[in-house]
Amino acid sequence: MNQIVIVGTSHHIAPLDFRERLSFSENQLIEAFQLLRKHPDVQEVAILSTCNRVEIYAVTRSKDGCAALSNFLSNYHQIESQQLDKFTYSHQNLDAVRHLFNVTASLDSMVVGEPQILGQVKEAYAQSLAAGATGDILNRLFTKALSVGKRVRTETNIAAGAVSISYAAVELAKKIFQSLEDKTVAIVGAGEMSELTAQHLVKNNVSKVIVANRTYQRAVDIAKRFNGTPLAYDADLSFLVEADIVISSTDAPHYLIDRPSLAEIMKQRKHRYMFLIDIAVPRDIDPEVSKVDNAFLYNIDDLEMVVASNLKDRGQEAEIATQIVKEEVAKFHSRLQILEVNPIIKALHQQFQGVASKELGTCLDKAQLTPKQQKMVEAMTQSIIKKLLHQPTAHLRQTVNDANNDHAQYVHALYEMFGLEQAKDLDTENTD
Amino acid sequence: MNSLFFHTLLLVYLAGCILHILFLSTGNQRIAKYGYWVTVGGFLLHSFFILLRWRYAGHPMAYWYDSTSFLAWAIILIYLCIAYRPRLRTVGVFVVPAAFIATLVAYTLQTQENTAIPTYLQNYWLIAHSSAIFLAYAAFIAAFGFGLMYLIEEKKIREKQHTLIFNLLPALGRSDELGHKCILVGVILMTMGILIGALWTQYVKEIKWAWVDSKVIFTIATWLIYVLQLSIRQILGWRGRKTAYSAIIGFAAVLFTYVGVNLFLPSIHAF
């Protein structure tokens, strides 16, 4: 009987050093696939190994497929089974399916809605496929899981809204400017947060970075990190005319930028949009500045509030996503079962065909019919087979689709009654 | 026949409106896709309907309601030019209802046969003149939509409310840019429409070029609003909120020129 099983670990239950020990490098993956394929119980296998999780998905013959995978992990990585049990989880069949769907839907991620996991699963599946480790069932499972991940992202807003301060700033910049590509960012002062934000902006293709500091040497030091232009400023803030995004975090005790001076700067830059981020405490930028047309000011509290509300929203969206996963698991379940009864239906057809062609052969030998009559008799035989098998086949398919019905007894009865020898090694029990 | 078409069209556009609004309130991209394709369906049906009217009435712009129906069609045309990019489908929330309303107006007016253009004027001049003007109107309505989108998004940014709508609406720079482009296209089309109208009077004996016609005066006034706005943007760099406000003022002018003039003032223009 075939079972879908998964054994793995993730940031939810295991510390980093354990996850490191359990992870597979590129070369180890190939080796692991070979070893697992040789395992008598394992029919199909796929391995997902990222920094947050290591998971082995497999289709096994025996009932305790999980144990087989756990043993493999403990042998391969030489980890005591006691420790392994403590830091790993295992799921079977529908729970395993649900787990993978949750993973691709990013519901199992450290930050719900994060975008990387879908790509990581895709990559892991591609590697397993290329190694020839997967088969019919896992191929279907992973293809479906990836589409579930996509569905969750298009139908919910789970990935919307930045969940860290620096990303919130980048997101805002993207909501103000059409594109960041030809934009200039000015970092005034220094600080971890402003540098991190600038880094994200550079990653989003900001074209120029100006680093302004009271001491020139300090500006040069910071500018090196972004390939930026260092600048020593005094009272003169004219460099802001060029800046589309200003990140300010000086330790000045008073406002550096006030409303009249910014209004003048805006006029000089022909009122092109300016996004000002004030990370300094005490503040560098007069809050009155936000009344200047086309200038947008956010301080550290504003950004923190945005992040908090985004996190809350994601929580709500996660509930919708969970519903989608539930729905997709049910759909996959019935597909899996149809997949299971298909060989039986096929065997049944084959048996009937065999009997018919044998009998037809003897009959046609004896009766000397014209070619036209022969064709008619053959067509009639086919039609009889079809009609005889229609009702049981339809009924079997229907039973499988009905979750409340245990179709195993039907399958069993068919085997017994028709003596379907060829199909005997196929599953006769409900995979649940 | 007319009624059947109008009923179907109204239903399709209404479905388009509902789907777009549903998209803006849920953020479900699949709904946006359905909304887009339903609107595409409405557009095809509408195009067929206009062709049919052309055959049946002998001219696509014979009556008042033909012009309103054409305006609705033109609005959808401009929507489709923008919304084939999925990120910009939010504009549908603002313009598809406009097309629905225009279609509804056309439907209620279809019984007023007395608004017909004299048959001797039903020629290609009329098609060129009115379609240029109505395409310009449609472009201005789209600009109005972008103006609203800009103002809503700006409000969300200033009030620091990063809600669903904040996430779905395009960046300020983008709304501003697209609104500007719509106005530019509208001004070009309107200029063409006015010039064609002026030339027409030179070629047709029955009508005289009428500077004092109220429709002409208000059309030129509307045109001036937009041209002025474009010039100031070019010279002083006006953008953002000011562009959005001028798009709204311009829209009011369009509305008055198209509907108000005929209701309150005498004009040689039937529409």
Image (cartoon, rainbow, N blue to C red):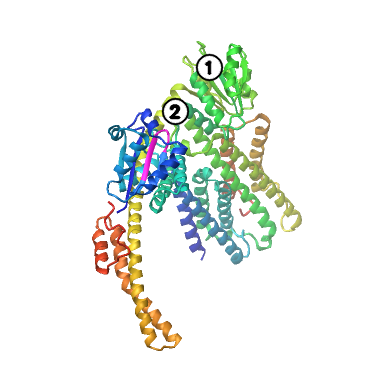
Q: Main secondary structure of the magenta part?
A: strand
- Which residue lies under the disc numbered 1? A190
Q: Position of residue A49 (x, y in %)?
A: 42, 37
Residue A355 horizontal side relative to residue B78, left or right: left
Residue B187 horizontal side relative to residue A187, left or right: right
Q: Quadrant of residue A213?
A: top right
Which numbered circle lies on residue A173? none
Q: Which residues are magenta?
A: A49-57
Residue at 27% across, 67% down: A419
| Element type at mark 2 | loop
As drawn, A52 above or below A139:
above
Residues A64 and B111: in front is: A64
Residues A95 and B135: in front is: A95
Residues A198 and B164: in front is: A198
- Which residue lies under the disc numbered 2? A164
Q: Amino acid at mark 2?
A: Ser
| Element type at mark 1 | loop
Callout 2: 10 Å neighbours few (<14), some, many (20+)?
Answer: some
Q: Amino acid at mark 1?
A: Ala
